[in-house]
Amino acid sequence: MNYGQKISASIQCLGKFCESRIRPENELHKMSELILVIEDDELTRKALQRSLRLYGFEVCMAKDGPDGLRLAQEKRPTFILLDWMMPEMDGLAVLSELKQNDKTSHIPVFMLTGRDTIGDLDEAFELGADDYIVKPLDLTDLGRTVTVKWKKYTNRTGASVKPRGRRIGVFKKRS
């Protein structure tokens, strides 16, 4: 099974796994975050979209850096998940442009990266990245990971979120 087939199978399993654990009696939370995902790999974009939507996030997708820059200005997302390694315009170039533009400089950016050395991460933080998520992504845990990182960011910075009425279930492990 190649990488693309594994991602495709993960997308299907993720949906079945998570949907089977949502119970109507679960406590519901309102979410309002619009996430812009800038990711060049189509299968990874679909997997991210599905996982994040299961956690109640609204998701806007961009296939490359220029498309992501355009959507960031148009949609004004709550935060951005930005792939580091992309053709044409890599994540650091996109990050730099986002942080230099008055319309987008305030938007938090979480880098999606396979890089985990201090020097690489320092470079992203110096350009204005707010956090990072290491690849390969655990699709069954991604929504929770993003939720936790977003809550830490809002607690650290005092950022506030305006409710849009989105609801998510709290997942409980069946016994």
Image: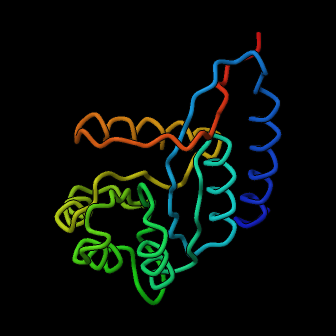
| Residue 9 drawn at (x, y percent) | 80, 54
Residue drawn at point x = 22 percent, y = 42 percent? 157
Residue shown at 25% from the left, 71% from the top: 99
> Is 159 displayed left or right of 28 in the figure?
left
Q: Give the vertical position of 57 relative to 71 (above or below).
A: above
Which part of the image, by quadrant, shows the C terminus? Answer: top right
Please tell me whether residue 46 is drawn above or below residue 12 in the rendered image: below
Q: Image check: 170 left or right of 74?
A: right
**Toward which corner of the image does residue 45 lie, by quadrant?**
bottom right
**Which quadrant of the figure has residue 59?**
bottom right
Question: Measured from the top left, where is residue 29 in percent x and y?
Answer: 58, 28
Q: Could you say where residue 97 lies in the image, as x and y percent from the top left?
A: 29, 79
Quadrant of image for the N terminus: bottom right
What scheme was used to colour the molecule? rainbow
Q: Nearer the viewer, residue 27 or 145?
A: 27
In this rendering, the count of numbered labels is 0
Q: Which residue, as the protein is rendered here, is positioned at the far left?
A: 126
Residue 56 placed where, x, y %? 62, 42
> Measuring 50% from the left and 40% from the top, which residue is drawn there?
163
Q: Is residue 49 left or right of residue 75?
A: right
- Kindly give the residue lying farthest to the top in the view shown: 175
Front residue of 166/94: it is 166
